[in-house]
């Protein structure tokens, strides 16, 4: 077989793999809730971080709607604590502190918010949720396209996780970019979990989560 044919065959196999994997990860949609009143009560929620602003200081609505979703769960009494997990790679960029401050402004008591400063990736956030914060049966908060991958990772690691979908921003350039990125992110998640057995970048000592009585 010629090199060209091998390349074509390999390309087809890769596309089939990506399509099948995407379909499988999307099947975790059944564990995602969209209405607060339908969400089962859990001890804690894991709020996955993202940048508060995009280019030129414009608000990132993925961030805005995740904050609102977390506040809605808290005010409805669906969770007793919130762990905010995000990137704090430099002193100038601190997702967990920004999320915490915005949650407090919206009415969530600071003492029931725990910061995970080493949630550099979704995989890190979920691994650390159990290893550092003792979360095993909890709610993940993000947009649907992101939740499906997070739930895939959580279930693969034996966690009892469900998702609560923050509002999306459909049919926007940002939404199309994120969804296109998801194909590769899901392939990377599969490799991390089942092939490379990737560990969190940082672990460390366990940290206590304060729960509302």
Image (spheres, rainbow, N blue to C red):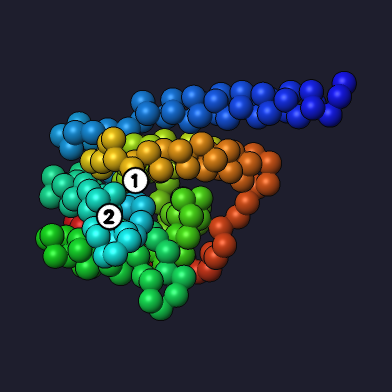
Q: Residues within 10 Å of mark 2 (few under 14, many from 20)?
A: some
Residue 118 position, x and y percent, is: 46, 65
- At 68% from the left and 41% from the top, the residue drawn is 195
Task: Farthest residue to the top: give it.
Answer: 1
Q: Are marks 2 and 1 in contact (CB under 8 Å)?
A: yes
Q: Position of residue 78 (x, y in %)?
A: 20, 44
Q: Is residue 16 visible?
A: yes
Query: What residue is pinned by disc 2?
Result: 60
Furthest-bottom residue in this view: 91
At horizontal 54% and vertical 40% (from top left) the residue drawn is 184
Direction from residue 28 to residue 187 in the image, left or right: right
Label 1 neighbourhood size at 10 Å, few (<14), some (14-19), many (20+)?
some
Q: Secondary structure at mark 2?
A: loop
Q: Quick one: which residue is furthest to the right in this view?
A: 1
Front-most of residues 26 and 138: 26
Residue 154, percent across and down? 47, 41
Comes first in the chain, label 2 or label 1: 2
Residue under numbered circle 1? 174
Q: Which mark is residue 24?
A: none
Above-or-below relation of 59 to 30:
below
Front: mark 2 or 1? 1
User: Considering only vertical position in the picture, is 183 above or below 47?
Assistant: above
């Amino acid at each position: 077989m010629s090199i060209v044919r091998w390349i074509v065959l390999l390309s087809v196999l890769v596309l089939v793999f990506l399509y099948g994997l995407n379909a499988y990860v999307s099947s975790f949609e059944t564990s995602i809730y969209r209405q607060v009143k339908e969400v089962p009560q859990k001890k804690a929620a894991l709020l996955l971080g993202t940048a508060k602003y995009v280019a030129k200081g414009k608000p990132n609505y993925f961030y805005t709607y995740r904050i609102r979703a977390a506040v809605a769960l808290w005010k409805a009494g669906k969770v007793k604590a919130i762990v905010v997990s995000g990137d704090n790679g430099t002193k100038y960029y601190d997702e967990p502190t920004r999320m915490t401050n915005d949650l407090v402004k919206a009415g969530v008591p600071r003492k029931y918010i725990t910061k995970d400063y080493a949630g550099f990736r979704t995989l890190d956030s979920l691994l650390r949720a159990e290893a550092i914060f003792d979360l095993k049966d909890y709610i993940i908060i993000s947009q649907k396209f992101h939740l499906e991958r997070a739930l895939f990772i959580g279930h693969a690691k034996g966690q009892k996780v469900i998702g609560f979908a923050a509002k999306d921003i459909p049919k926007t350039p940002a939404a199309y970019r994120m969804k296109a990125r998801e194909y590769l992110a899901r392939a990377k998640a599969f490799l991390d979990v089942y092939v490379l057995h990737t560990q969190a970048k940082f672990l460390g000592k366990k940290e206590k989560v304060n729960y509302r009585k």
